[in-house]
Image (cartoon, rainbow, N blue to C red):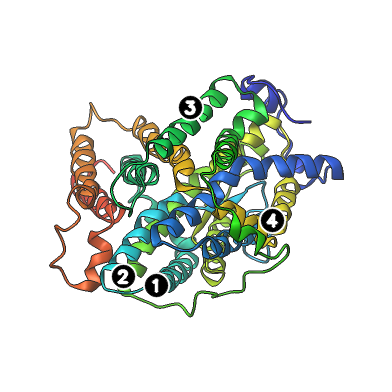
Amino acid sequence: MLMESDMPVQPLADAVEPDPGAVDEVPAFSKLAVLGLQHVMVMYAGAVAVPLVLGHALGLTASQIGLLVSADLFGCGLVTLLQTIGIKGVGLRMPIMMGVTFASIGPMLAIANSNIAAGHGPEHSLQVICGAVLVAGVFGLLIAPVLGKIARFFPPVVTGTVILVIGVSLIGIGVGWIVGQGRSGEVDASHAAMSFFVLALILAVLRFGRGMVRNAAILIGVAVGTGVASAMGMTDFSAVGESAIVGFTPPLVFGMPRFELGAAVSMMFVMIIVMVESVGMFFAVSEIVGKPMDSALMTRGLRADGLGTIIGGLFNAFPYTSFSQNIGLIAITGVRSRFVCATGAVIMLGLALSPKLAVAIASIPSFVLGGAGLVMFGMIAATGVRILGKVDLSGNPHNQTILAVSLSMGMVPLVSEGIFASLPQPLQPFVHSGIVLATISAVALNWLLNKDRN
């Protein structure tokens, strides 16, 4: 049932002309269960990465991070159902798995750092993030019908630069996990060794693994690394025994949302980028499944992004987008039914209702995640490079200028954290986030320099 070879996509998915009706077919239950689980395994590590990153950065307890993980998985399930099954005017009704966008990490960490610097606790930061996510979701709903006009401001030179900045910015987080960010400053050699063991294991699986095994490389690396660390007495899973087997993370568990202008606007930037990325992924899915894309269908899919982000905010989670790795899985398996992804969504909901599992995931040591983080965050940067590979950098020198200046602006908060310390508090989320600085710079320079070409 699962593909166990690295054969090219075309012989599997494109040997015959795609049948648009295959999208609405309902496979046998056994096939639904296996393929739905495969979709979950492909996206699981990425789906829980954002709450783990944010939780560790805020210094939350394992139980609190477990709440974030459960809420995130619950949101993934709900929003995937919204996109695959749909409601009136919302949902693409194609095989798409939805998860938290990595583009949101940078602004959320900037919001958190700004609030912590102001003397607020982690709960206050989560409330501000929640408010920003809700505003971004409403904004996404409003701009969905007119995205075609907005998308012209986000050509590949802009989106590629911004995604590259996101990846490079996040690599520092992975390194922080390895060396013990926020601790005494001394690097534990055993922790660093374990991080690089996980990294080496992931690389080995990516090199020699096939099919499902290769798709689960991150999951395998973290699981084996955690097992080895536990055998060596380097883990603490005591909170798992105190957690309930079944439970539900209620909406707004960390308190009512707080609305701050700077935080909200920075998350709105993320929403625009997410929706522009979604346009490309929606076209990719429509090509694979053979279902023509039109403006009405595109609007339905983008509304699901916006409404899904609102749901994420209400359930203490984050902005949601379609996961590109799952789109690739559709091409590999050749199974185009949207109900396969809907089954994956139900599995995600089931995982979300197990606090014991969520706390177990949250108890994974940071140094184990560090090895995986170098791969995951580096892949984001590589995605930006891949997009920039489509940009004419030699024939159009303006594109070089846009990339050079915007990349430099995005690096400013990384190399000099205190450079904007004297600015007013409402501006701090803007200037502390490399993604926001890079986005503003890239959009503005592209409009100024490439206006005639565009």
Q: Which mark is residue 148?
A: none
Given contact means CB atoms under 8 Å apart, are the residues at marks 3 and 4 in contact?
no
Label 2: state its secondary structure.
helix
Dots 2 and 3: beta carbons under 8 Å?
Answer: no
Residue 95 x, y percent position in the rendering: 67, 46
- 369 and 236: which is toward the camera: 236
Judging depth in this view, the residue of 157 and 192 nearest the camera is 192
Residue 91 in sight in this render: no
Tell me if residue 51 comes above or below residue 188 in the rendering.
Answer: below
CB-based contact (under 8 Å), mark 2 and mark 1: yes
Sequence-wise, the earlier of marks 3 and 4 is: 3
C-alpha span from label 2 to label 1: 9 Å
The first of marks 2 and 3 along the sequence is: 2
Amino acid identity at mark 1: Val
> Taking 449 as reference, is 113 left or right?
right
- The residue that label 3 is drawn on is 200
Task: Indicate which label's residue lies in the foreground, 2 or 1.
Answer: 2
Between discs 3 and 1, the one toward the N terminus: 1
Q: Which residue is mark 2?
A: 115
Q: Indicate which label's residue lies in the foreground, 1 or 4.
A: 4
The residue that disc 1 covers is: 128
Badge 4 element: helix
State which tag comes first along the sequence, 2 or 4.
2
